[in-house]
Image (cartoon, rainbow, N blue to C red):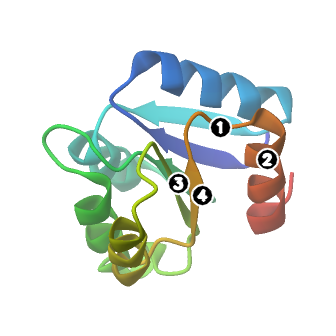
């Protein structure tokens, strides 16, 4: 099994596409439907990377990132925002919360894998 990646998005189709892309490159994806679900899954296991949407119910991506960064056991884990948002203020807020990178949807599978490979390798 490849390195574990947590994919967080409220859209089932996006979760499926990201998971398929990661699996095809040898990674081991786990999915979560929002920030609350993601934090629960982080409590249950270790991940090499988190890929998250920004706008989600229950807990948005920026709030989730800030909560993850407050957990010492996940301090160095890369977190990539994968969102339709391209607004500079949102990017600044994401970076301030601790996001490592930002990819705008719709995403190119090759670009996503290039970012993942750069951050954690296969």
Q: Residues within 10 Å of mark 2 (few under 14, many from 20)?
A: few
Q: Label 2 belongs to which residue?
A: 111
Q: Identify which residue, 9 or 43, lies in the foreground.
A: 9
Between disc 3 and disc 1, whose residue precedes?
Answer: 3
Residue 22 visible: yes
In the visual, does 114 lie left or right of 33? right
- To which residue does mark 4 refer? 49
Task: Say whether marks 4 and 3 touch (CB < 8 Å).
Answer: yes
Q: CA distance from mark 4 to mark 3?
A: 4 Å
The percent position of residue 3, horizontal first and vertical second, equals: 73, 49
Q: Viewer-proximal residue, 98 or 93?
A: 93
Residue 64, horizontal then vertical, whole percent:
28, 60
Quadrant the N terminus occupies: top right
Instruction: Give how far apart the Cα atoms at labels 2 and 3 are.
Output: 16 Å
Query: Label 4: how many residues lie within 10 Å, few (<14), some (14-19) or many (20+)?
Result: many
Q: Nearer the viewer, mark 3 or mark 1?
A: 1
Residue 47 in sight from this viewpoint: no
Identify residue for label 1: 107
Label 4 to label 2, Cα distance in Å? 16 Å
Q: Residue at x 32, y 55 (%)?
A: 61
First in sequence: mark 2 vs mark 3:
3
In primary-sequence order, the first of circles 4 and 2 is 4
Q: In front of the other: label 2 or label 3?
A: 2
Q: Compared to 38, does 69 lie above or below?
A: below
**Label pair 3/1, CB-CB below 8 angstroms:** no
Numbered tag placed on residue 50 in the rendering:
3
Q: Residue at 34% across / 54% down in the picture?
A: 43
């Amino acid at each position: 099994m490849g390195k574990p990646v947590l994919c967080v998005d409220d859209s089932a189709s996006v979760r499926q596409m990201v998971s398929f892309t990661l699996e095809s490159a040898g990674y081991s994806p786990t999915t979560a439907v929002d920030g609350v679900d993601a934090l629960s899954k982080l409590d249950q296991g270790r991940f090499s990377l988190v890929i998250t949407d920004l706008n989600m119910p229950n807990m948005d991506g920026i709030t989730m990132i800030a909560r993850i960064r407050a957990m010492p056991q996940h301090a160095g884990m890369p977190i990539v925002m994968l969102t339709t948002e391209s607004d500079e203020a949102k990017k600044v807020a994401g970076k301030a919360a601790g996001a490592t990178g930002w990819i705008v949807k719709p995403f190119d599978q090759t670009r996503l894998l290039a970012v993942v490979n750069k951050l954690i390798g296969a």
